[in-house]
Amino acid sequence: LAKTTQPISMDSYEGQEVNITCSHNNIATNDYITWYQQFPSQGPRFIIQGYKTKVTNEVASLFIPADRKSSTLSLPRVSLSDTAVYYCLVRRDFGNEKLTFGTGTRLTIIP
Amino acid sequence: SAVISQKPSRDICQRGTSLTIQCQVDSQVTMMFWYRQQPGQSLTLIATANQGSEATYESGFVIDKFPISRPNLTFSTLTVSNMSPEDSSIYLCSVEAPGQGYDYGYTFGSGTRLTVV
């Protein structure tokens, strides 16, 4: 599976839009991009997943350019409760595949 | 999505002893995954547990150290054997709920925080 690279940490103020970019240069045709959020003392929680262009749900948006070598997770109007580690992963398009976690991005929201 | 109950939530153990961690899922799942998360680090897959067959271990993890049981489609255990302080980590189980497709990802338990003294 393609290796992912993302910033180690980011800070943002409450109310701002936060964009976290992930690089996955070796992504394969059958791979999806998926993002997880992890709060302290909890397991990761699925946020969003996409294959190309744009995906939006009630939590976030995911932007994937045509070459799919990168993706951007967008969190609108963040609050203190969005402080967490965000992981970008690449996974194959069939189920029950193991997930490979990278370093993740530690997002800190400042009041 | 699936609901996972993981026990114990935390434990402090003496070196040389063993701890068995339980993972109960509220629906039948084909595979269950066990991860380790060392302090301040990302998650590392230990093994994949398929009901009715031996678990598949990742590089660096062996069955003698981390034996896994998978007696049915809703339950699995991970044992950390002959513990040393280096085993102090959070251990998590994970499943992909059947029928959910790719839009819901994987569900993780809340983890077991193990401290070996």
Image: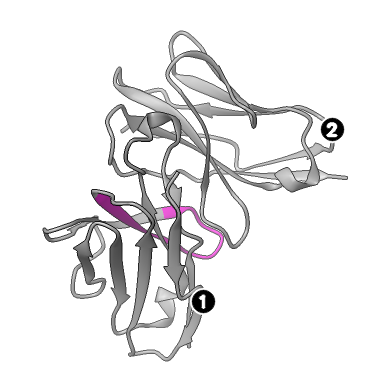
As for residue B42 lying within the magenta part, the answer is: yes
Asked whether A8 or B62 is in front, the reply is B62
The quarter holding residue B84 reads: bottom left
Where is residue A57? Give x, y as percent.
60, 25
Host chain of mark 2 = A
Label pair 2/1, CB-CB below 8 angstroms:
no
Q: Is residue A37 left or right of residue B63?
A: right
The region drawn magenta spans B31-43
Q: Residue B47, position in %: x, y?
A: 26, 57
Which x, y percent locates residue A15? 84, 32
Q: Chain of mark 1?
A: B
Quadrant location, the C terminus of chain A: top right
Q: Classify mark 2: helix, strand or loop.
A: loop
Residue B91 visible? The answer is: no
Q: Residues within 10 Å of mark 1 (few under 14, many from 20)?
A: some
Distance (Cα) linking label 2 and label 1: 35 Å
Query: Disc 1 marks which amino acid?
Result: Arg
Which three-letter amino acid code belongs to the residue tagged 2? Gly
Residue A90 sits above or below residue B19 on the image: above
Residue A56 percent across, percent down from the top left: 59, 21
Among the 4 quarters of the image, the one containing residue A91: top left
Q: Residue at x 25, y 64 (%)?
A: B61
- The chief SS type of the magenta part is strand
- Crowding at dot 2, Cα within 10 Å, few <14 / some 14-19 / many 20+, comes out as some
Give the label on residue B10, or none: 1
In the picture, the disc for residue A15 is 2
Quadrant including the N terminus of chain A: top left
* A27, above or below B76, in the image: above
- Among all residues in the image, which is located at the extreme front? B27
- Disc 1 is placed on an element classified as strand
